Image (cartoon, grey):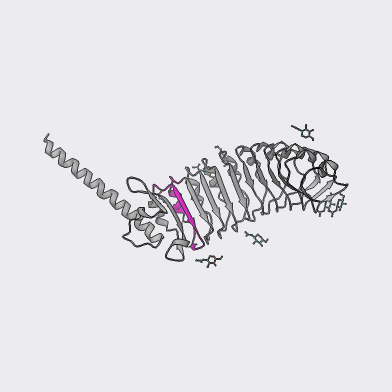
Amino acid sequence: MNSSFLLITFIIIIVLKCISTQSTINEECSLVNRLMSIDEVYNCCREDKITCSNDGHITKLHASSDYMKSSYYFIPPEIDILTNLKDLNLLGNGLIGSIPPELGNLTNLEYLRLFNTNLTGSIPLELGNLINLEYLEIDSNKLTGSIPSELGNLSELGYLVIAKNHLTGSIPSSLGNLTKLKDLGIFNTNLTGTIPPEFGNLINLEYLNLCNNKLTGPISQEIGKLVNLKKLYLFNNEFTGSIPKEIGTILKLKTLDISLNKLNGLILPELGNLSDLEYLDLSNNNLTGSIPPELGKLTKLKTLELSNNNLSGSIPKEIKKLNIKLNK
Ligand SMILES: *[C@@H]1O[C@H](CO)[C@@H](O)[C@H](O)[C@H]1NC(C)=O
Ligand SMILES: *[C@@H]1O[C@H](CO)[C@@H](O)[C@H](O)[C@H]1NC(C)=O
Ligand SMILES: *[C@@H]1O[C@H](CO)[C@@H](O)[C@H](O)[C@H]1NC(C)=O
Ligand SMILES: *[C@@H]1O[C@H](CO)[C@@H](O)[C@H](O)[C@H]1NC(C)=O
Ligand SMILES: *[C@@H]1O[C@H](CO)[C@@H](O)[C@H](O)[C@H]1NC(C)=O
Ligand SMILES: *[C@@H]1O[C@H](CO)[C@@H](O)[C@H](O)[C@H]1NC(C)=O
Ligand SMILES: *[C@@H]1O[C@H](CO)[C@@H](O)[C@H](O)[C@H]1NC(C)=O
Ligand SMILES: *[C@@H]1O[C@H](CO)[C@@H](O)[C@H](O)[C@H]1NC(C)=O
């Protein structure tokens, strides 16, 4: 075969490849420029809130109404042309409209944060397709509807926060499959129902926050399986029954706040085993009986809140010895 023919073919292939890469870059930038109301001809890869790969695809996009020309913006359904996107962080109350289901096509996403926005509508179940997601935060929006059980398919998630939205329904039990989770926050959302017993599978959890909801039922003894928990916030719900003694086996706990519920029964001496505890709030329940002297073993305790219960007896001398602020 003629070698100059080969060379020409090779050059044509290179040129075509450059043109097609160029056109996807232009397409991607033009979408992002529209989103951020930037001049169309601008090379968006030069923006410091945007990162592009060597071959020119957008991999990171951080946008906020604070530094945009327009006071509002929305997520266009065409966002799914950004197929290489790994990191999407959209902030500011200028973000309006709903979350398009097409966001679920961005299967390379590892980080997704929608924070302090005016987003309305529901959380699309298509977000459950983002199988590479490690971080998902949907915080302070005006979203309605329920948490889609499909989020239980995001098996790489280490961080999940869904907070300060007007959601309804209960916490899907499928979230109990997210065994890589270290941080799980579902708070200020007015959710109902119980804590799924499947949460006992989340053995890597270090932080669990379910405060300010309308959760009911007893605090399941499964909670005792979460041996890596350092912070547990269950305050301001409608939990009933007694404090499960299994909480006394979560030896890494530093913060335990189960105040403002409808718990009854005794303050268990097992809580005295939590030797790392710094903050213990059991106030505003209906706990009875006397304060167990075993709490005096909690030498790292800085705050002990027991007020507005139905406790009897006096404060044990072991507790008086602790250098703490005590509200009974
Ligand atoms: C977003 O919500 C805030 C208060 O909730 C409001 O003041 C602001 O005007 C809203 N922004 C837009 C662009 O609608
Ligand atoms: C993108 O998402 C939409 C809505 O979820 C869906 O209808 C469409 O088929 C998806 N496109 C691709 C290429 O996956
Ligand atoms: C995702 O989760 C839903 C509901 O939890 C389930 O029905 C579906 O089969 C899952 N899809 C995949 C691809 O795992
Ligand atoms: C939760 O419900 C209370 C009233 O029951 C309401 O005042 C509050 O705004 C609701 N919170 C959210 C985040 O929807
Ligand atoms: C959790 O995952 C298992 C297998 O991975 C699946 O069979 C089960 O349906 C899932 N549970 C829920 C509640 O989605
Ligand atoms: C926890 O505390 C209880 C009561 O104070 C005690 O009987 C028990 O042996 C302790 N358990 C461990 C594992 O230290
Ligand atoms: C507290 O519990 C007692 C029984 O242990 C019950 O009689 C009383 O009604 C409860 N109080 C509240 C405010 O729930
Ligand atoms: C305190 O407990 C006693 C005995 O269980 C009960 O009779 C009483 O109603 C309780 N008080 C309140 C305010 O709940």
Residue at 17% from the left image edge and 41% from the top image edge: 9
Q: Does residue 162 appear left or right of residue 281 in this picture?
A: left
Counting labels gives 0
Could you say which is closer to the camera, residue 145 or residue 309?
309
Q: Which residues, given as a range, are shown in magenta?
A: 84-109
Q: Position of residue 252 (x, y in %)?
A: 67, 38
Residue at 23% from the left image edge and 47% from the top image edge: 16
Q: Position of residue 119 (x, y in %)?
A: 52, 60
Outermost right residue: 313
Q: Within the magenta stretch, is there residue 102?
A: yes
Residue at 49% from the left image edge and 50% from the top image edge: 112
Could you say which is closer to the camera, residue 82 or residue 248?
248
Could you say which is closer to the camera, residue 137 or residue 99?
137
Q: Within the magenta stretch, is there residue 78?
A: no
Q: Is residue 114 placed above or below 132 in the rendered structure?
A: below
Q: Is residue 293 placed above or below 234 in the rendered structure?
A: above
Q: Does residue 115 appear left or right of residue 268 in this picture?
A: left
Q: Position of residue 140 (x, y in %)?
A: 57, 57
Residue at 13% from the left image edge and 39% from the top image edge: 5
Q: Does residue 238 appear left or right of residue 13 in this picture?
A: right
Q: Does residue 132 appear left or right of residue 146 in this picture?
A: left
In the rendered image, which quarter contains the N terminus?
top left
Q: Position of residue 313 (x, y in %)?
A: 88, 47
